[in-house]
Image (cartoon, grey):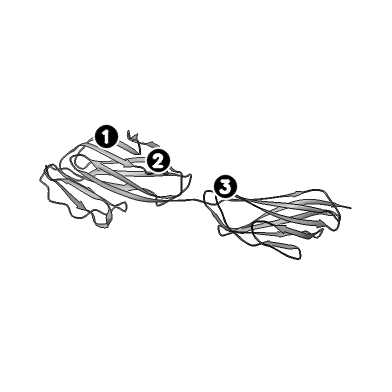
Amino acid sequence: MSIKQLLLAGGVGLLAVAMSAGLASAVQSEGQPAAAAPVVSSGAPIVEITKRCPSLRYVGRKATFEVVVTNRGTGPARNVVVTDNFPAGVEFLSADNGGQREGGNVVWNLGTLEAGQSRTLKVEARCNQITNVRNMARVTYCAEAQAECQLVVKGIPAILLECVDDPDPVEVGSQTTYTIIVTNQGSETGTNIAITCTLPPEQEFVKAGGPTEARADGKVVTFAPLPSLAPRAKATFLVTTKGVRPGDSRFAVSMKSDQIDSPVTETESTNIYD
């Protein structure tokens, strides 16, 4: 039995054709058929495979991968096996229609696919890391065909802003320090994180420090943007003030970044007494 290999237009994949037993054709994830197939004799199976998946997911989210195999021929395709490959970073969760996990693959033994019959197979998986996923499925019977889909997995930064004073309460003429902690709780790096602090009337600026330069202009302290903050990383900014008159004061902190559309604010209460 001779085997002929055809390279499909559009880079879909490799098509193997068993000329004496049948024909397999591959279809892109958008549903466009491959190049014209060789002529086959009456009663031959022609098995087509289509692969579908979402184009974008975020880290930690689930994705459903779908394989459709269809016998477009006039005869049955026997001993049909579908293999769906999963690359690193994608965690297998479940498969329908009796699909079994075998290493990095999910395998379905479909048996006979009659002429005109179609089977839809689904796999649910979780995207665990930032990556570009190339998911390929293969159908074999007396010939072989492949199809693939592309999935981009992205992360999301999630910046937490915290502020605490020490000491509190504060006597007029004494100092207190505000510790501002910025934590990236997300799965992607946060960029250009800018901290701005506003002092209340009951306080005056003494000093400030942190991973970027601080500038004071009256009651406003501005830190230069922090270029990047990796997932699970923290950055600490310090602002020291002095109590100048008694009152229940409010120290305000505002945070912006490339990924934050509107400022995040935090207010810390400090009691200043005579």
Residue at 34 percent of width and 50 percent of height:
149
- In the image: residue 164, left or right of residue 211: right
Q: Which residue is mark 1?
A: 109
- In the image: residue 61, left or right of residue 230: left
Residue at 12 percent of width and 50 percent of height:
39
Quarter of the figure with residue 122 = top left
Q: Nearer the viewer, residue 47 or 227?
A: 227
**Picture mark count:** 3
For badge 3, the amino acid type reads Arg
Q: Position of residue 271 (x, y in %)?
A: 82, 50
Tag 1's secondary structure? strand
Q: Nearer the viewer, residue 37 or 138?
A: 138
Name, please, the residue furthest toward the right. 274
Q: Which residue is mark 3?
A: 232
Tag 3's secondary structure? loop
Q: Which residue is mark 2?
A: 124
Q: Position of residue 207 (x, y in %)?
A: 75, 59
Tag 2's secondary structure? strand
For badge 1, the amino acid type reads Asn
Q: Nearer the viewer, residue 128 or 223?
A: 223
For badge 2, the amino acid type reads Glu
